Image (tube, rainbow, N blue to C red):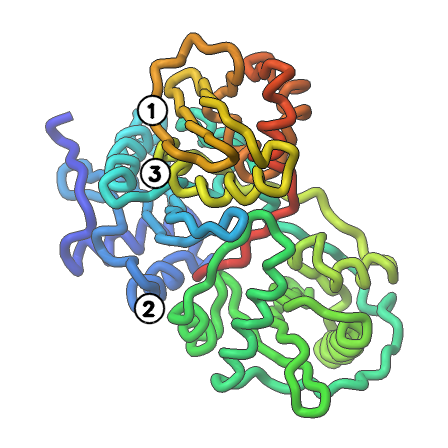
């Protein structure tokens, strides 16, 4: 291995070679290299040190990135890192370079206090690093534009302006309240998206719907491969949804676009309107998630656990509850419904609550209930007296991650 080295981007020459790696792996037309440059120029906390590379002598052969994010669970913000732009030149694959990069990546996450790591990556590959599928990703609802009724656009639809940012931010925050887990888009990111007209790898046009001078919704459109994509929309009532659909039909017909593809959560009212007129929902892919620091996670969520206990039959619970996650054990010292201490414990032989630490993320993020885990996984077992308690602490719920760069 003395011909190989591990580092971050350090020079302009490194950066250009890294961008060429992006073009080689992801294609000249996918715009991943452009997205990286946009992140470096605009995204809070993303810089040369966020890019990890392996070099063979002086040649960059593999890489991955840390993209800082904030996710919320039950209203508690958590420091999250997205592992992005994972790439290895084809002639260097299956030699363990991504495993080396992943080890360095997780070391950085521990040093900087990240609690979870997430990735949108390819199927199966990341299971070797402890990632589990959780929250829906690449959600779509499709409908031919000629199936959209000729709704009267009773609201005013206009181009999004910079001064609309505070109202749009509030609308998104209101819409996200329905989700057990959601992303938190910083003001700086809103401003960058507005300035650049890009959301992730999607160029977009932003619009708002107004009624009597008040913005009732905002939405973002993009065109790809002859289709009109609705890549984001805030929560809508029926009148607003029909007005936006009327606008979208006219927009698509003017440009010869035969299909509308909504990438909006299946739990949004707009999607319910779309499916009511014949839109077909897909079976989404999913975010892959790994918990980086279980102890810090439980400490951070202690106020949320207390709120959930307070609204349950366990509001006066006194007990020391041990979560045996096989490779680690976390103890909650609960007195009269209040969590007095969260601590590591030596209860790896405890059989009261045993949950595979990798699939625990499904419970944490509400993608599967306690009973579903018990049914699916043989390495999940919970004594009957604790089953309902675990369900109270970790309820199943709907979640959605709005893009953060």
Mark 1: few/some/many CA within 10 Å (<14, 14-19, 20+): some
User: Dot 2 corresponds to which residue?
Assistant: 42
Task: Pick whichever of labels 1 and 2 is earlier in the sequence.
Answer: 2
User: Dot 3 corresponds to which residue?
Assistant: 88
Q: Which of these two is toward me, 289 or 47? A: 289
Q: Secondary structure under badge 1? A: strand
Contact between marks 1 and 2 (CB within 8 A): the answer is no
Taking the image as drawn, is residue 4 in sight?
A: yes
Residue at 46 percent of width and 44 percent of height: 303
Query: From mark 1 to mark 2, how far is it between C-alphas?
Result: 39 Å
Taking 206 as reference, is 140 left or right? right
Mark 2: few/some/many CA within 10 Å (<14, 14-19, 20+): some
Query: From mark 3 to mark 2, how far is it between C-alphas?
Result: 26 Å
Contact between marks 3 and 2 (CB within 8 A): the answer is no
User: Dot 1 corresponds to which residue?
Assistant: 344
* Residue 61: percent from left, percent from top: 27, 40
Residue at 71 percent of width and 91 percent of height: 212
Taking 85 as reference, is 238 left or right? right
What is the residue that sits farthest to the left in this orientation?
2
């Amino acid at each position: 291995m003395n011909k190989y080295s591990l580092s971050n981007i350090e020079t302009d020459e490194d950066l250009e070679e890294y961008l060429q790696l992006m073009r080689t792996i992801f294609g000249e037309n996918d715009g991943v290299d452009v997205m990286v440059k946009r992140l470096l120029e605009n995204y809070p906390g993303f810089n040369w040190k966020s890019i990890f590379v392996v070099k063979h002598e002086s040649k960059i052969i593999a890489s991955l990135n840390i993209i800082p994010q904030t996710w919320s669970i039950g209203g508690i913000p958590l420091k999250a890192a997205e592992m992005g732009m994972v790439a290895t030149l084809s002639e260097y694959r299956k030699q363990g370079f991504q495993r080396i990069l992943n080890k360095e990546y997780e070391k950085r996450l521990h040093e900087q206090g990240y609690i979870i790591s997430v990735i949108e990556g390819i199927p199966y590959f990341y299971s070797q690093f402890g990632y589990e599928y959780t929250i829906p990703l690449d959600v779509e609802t499709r409908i031919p534009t000629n199936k959209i009724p000729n709704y009267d656009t009773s609201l005013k639809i206009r181009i999004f302006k910079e001064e609309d940012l505070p109202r749009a931010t509030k609308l998104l925050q209101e819409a996200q309240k329905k989700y057990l887990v959601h992303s938190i888009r910083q003001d700086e990111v809103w401003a960058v998206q507005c300035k650049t007209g890009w959301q992730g790898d999607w160029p977009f046009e932003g619009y708002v719907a107004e009624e009597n001078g008040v913005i009732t919704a905002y939405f973002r459109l993009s065109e790809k491969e002859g289709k009109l994509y609705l890549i984001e929309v805030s929560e809508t009532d029926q009148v607003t949804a029909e007005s936006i659909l009327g606008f979208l039909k006219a927009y698509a017909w003017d440009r010869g676009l035969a299909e509308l593809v909504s990438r909006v959560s299946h739990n949004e009212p707009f999607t319910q309107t779309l499916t009511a007129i014949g839109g077909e929902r897909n079976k989404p892919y999913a975010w892959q998630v790994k918990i980086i620091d279980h102890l810090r996670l439980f400490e951070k969520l202690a106020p949320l656990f207390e709120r959930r206990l307070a609204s349950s039959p366990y509001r006066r619970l006194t007990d020391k509850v041990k979560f045996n996650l096989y490779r680690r054990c976390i103890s909650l010292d609960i007195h009269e419904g209040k969590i007095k201490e969260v601590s590591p414990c030596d209860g790896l032989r405890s059989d009261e609550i045993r949950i595979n630490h990798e699939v625990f993320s499904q419970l944490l993020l509400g993608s599967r209930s306690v009973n579903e885990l018990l049914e699916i996984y043989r390495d999940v077992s919970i004594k009957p007296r604790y089953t309902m308690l675990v369900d109270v602490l970790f309820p199943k719920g709907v979640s959605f991650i709005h893009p953060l760069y």
